[in-house]
Image: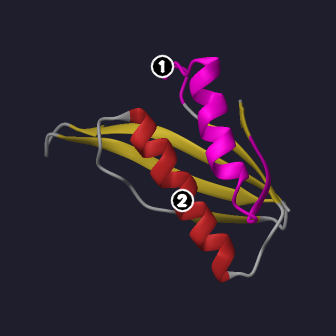
Amino acid sequence: MNVTLTIERYFTERRGRAGWNRTVTTDEPATYNLGPIETNIAVNAIETSIEAVADMLARENVTGAALTVVVPDEITLTESLQTAIIDKFSADPTFASVAFGA
């Protein structure tokens, strides 16, 4: 199964809140909204979102999913940081692969 996690920054001026919206699409096709996460740390938002995808897929008894993570252009992830995140989550049998894409 191909899975795409899209993370987008939001800011609510009226409430003075910022965070990240998270959407998951699969090749079934299906779209899931994981809901917002309020953190200003991009890496925390990425890792927490991947964990949420793993939980969602585990509940569906899915293993071997190919996950692509799409983040906004303003987030700069070094190659070593991308590798660390990919290595961390590739160890989970839920994912056959983890990659960052556009």
As drawn, is 84 to the left or to the right of 90?
Answer: left
What colour scheme governs how the chains and residues are painted in the rendered image of this protein? secondary structure
Residue located at (61% from left, 22% from top): 80
Q: Amino acid at mark 2?
A: Glu
- Neighbour tally class for label 2: few under 14, some 14-19, many 20 plus, Cα within 10 Å: few
**How many numbered markers are drawn?**
2
Does dot 2 land on a helix, a strand or a loop?
A: helix
**Measured Cα–Cα span from mark 1 to mark 2:** 22 Å
What span is colored magenta in the figure?
72-98
- Pointer 1: what residue? 74
Q: Amino acid at mark 1?
A: Glu
Instruction: Work out whether residue 10 or residue 65 is closer to the camera in this orientation and state it.
Output: 65
Q: Position of residue 74 (x, y in %)?
A: 48, 19
Let me know if residue 79 is in the magenta part: yes
> Which of the labelled discs sits on residue 51, or is there none?
2
- Neighbour tally class for label 1: few under 14, some 14-19, many 20 plus, Cα within 10 Å: few
Q: Nearer the viewer, mark 1 or mark 2?
A: 2
Q: Position of residue 96 (x, y in %)?
A: 83, 55
- Quarter of the image for residue 71 reads top right
As drawn, is 63 to the left or to the right of 13?
Answer: right
Residue located at (74% from left, 81% from top): 61
Q: Position of residue 29 (x, y in %)?
A: 81, 65
Q: Is residue 66 visible?
A: yes
- Whichever of labels 1 and 2 marks the residue nearer the N terminus, that label is 2
Query: In what quadrant of the picture does the C terminus appear?
Result: top right
